[in-house]
Image (cartoon, rainbow, N blue to C red):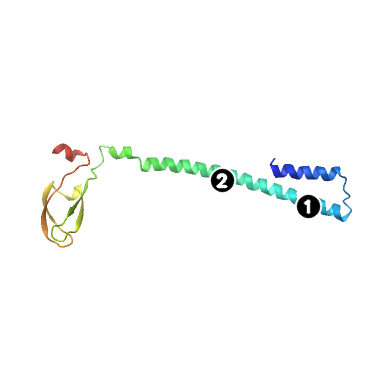
Amino acid sequence: MGLISERVAYLKGLAEGMKLNEESNEGKLLKAIIDVLDDVALSVEDVEDVQEALSQQVDEIDEDLSEIESILFDEEEDDDEDEECDCETEIECPYCNETICLEDGEMDEEEGTITCPSCKKEFDYKWECDCGCEHDDEK
């Protein structure tokens, strides 16, 4: 039983102990006020129960979300040997100074010729992978 319900029960007992005349206007008013307070106390208890249940559900959802995040964003899984290398490098075109982002799969070798997608001119590049993948072992 909540604090509000206990206080309303005390007021009910106090009113009964005072032997208020429920036939008088003051007695009717006090009884009606106590009944309204009792209804309010019951409503507050219902709201508190619902709030507690929702709080528990939110905590469970938070735990589930944390578990999903650890599965999706776990960096230990990125070290898996079966995955392809995510090497990426940026090369600047010497003609138009455009930065060209290249992934490992876009380059046949560590050095060669590439065509700038912006100015369409060819230039030589030299690419070094420093991510710790198998390309580093081949050097």
Q: Residue 92 at what x, y percent from top left? A: 17, 55
Residue farthest toward the bottom in the current orientation of the protein = 119
Sequence-wise, the earlier of marks 2 and 1 is 1
Neighbor class of circle 1 (other Cα within 10 Å; few <14, some 14-19, many 20+) is: few
Is 15 on the left or on the right of 106, as rendered? Answer: right
Total labels: the figure holds 2
Q: Judge whether 137 appears above or below 35 on screen.
A: above
Quarter of the picture containing the N terminus is top right
Q: Residue at x 73, y 41 (%)?
A: 6
Q: Residue 82 at what x, y percent from top left? A: 25, 38
Q: Residue at x 20, y 56 (%)?
A: 99
Q: Judge whether 135 appears above or below 92 on screen.
A: above
Q: Which mark is residue 2?
A: none
Q: Which mark is residue 33?
A: 1
Q: Residue 57 at what x, y percent from top left? A: 53, 43
Q: Amino acid at mark 1?
A: Ile
Q: Amino acid at mark 2?
A: Leu
Q: Residue 110 at what x, y percent from top left? A: 13, 46
Which picture quadrant has residue 85? Answer: top left
Q: Residue at x 50, y 41 (%)?
A: 60
Is 24 on the left or on the right of 58, as rendered? Answer: right
Q: Helix, strand or loop at disc 1? A: helix
Q: Residue at x 52, y 45 (%)?
A: 58
Q: Helix, strand or loop at disc 2? A: helix
Q: Are marks 2 and 1 in contact (CB under 8 Å)?
A: no
Q: Which mark is residue 54?
A: 2
Is 52 on the left or on the right of 1, as rendered? Answer: left
Which picture quadrant has residue 79? Answer: top left
Is 40 on the left or on the right of 66, as rendered? Answer: right
Which of the two marks, 2 or 1, is nearer to us in this view? 1
Alpha-carbon distance for marks 2 and 1?
Answer: 31 Å
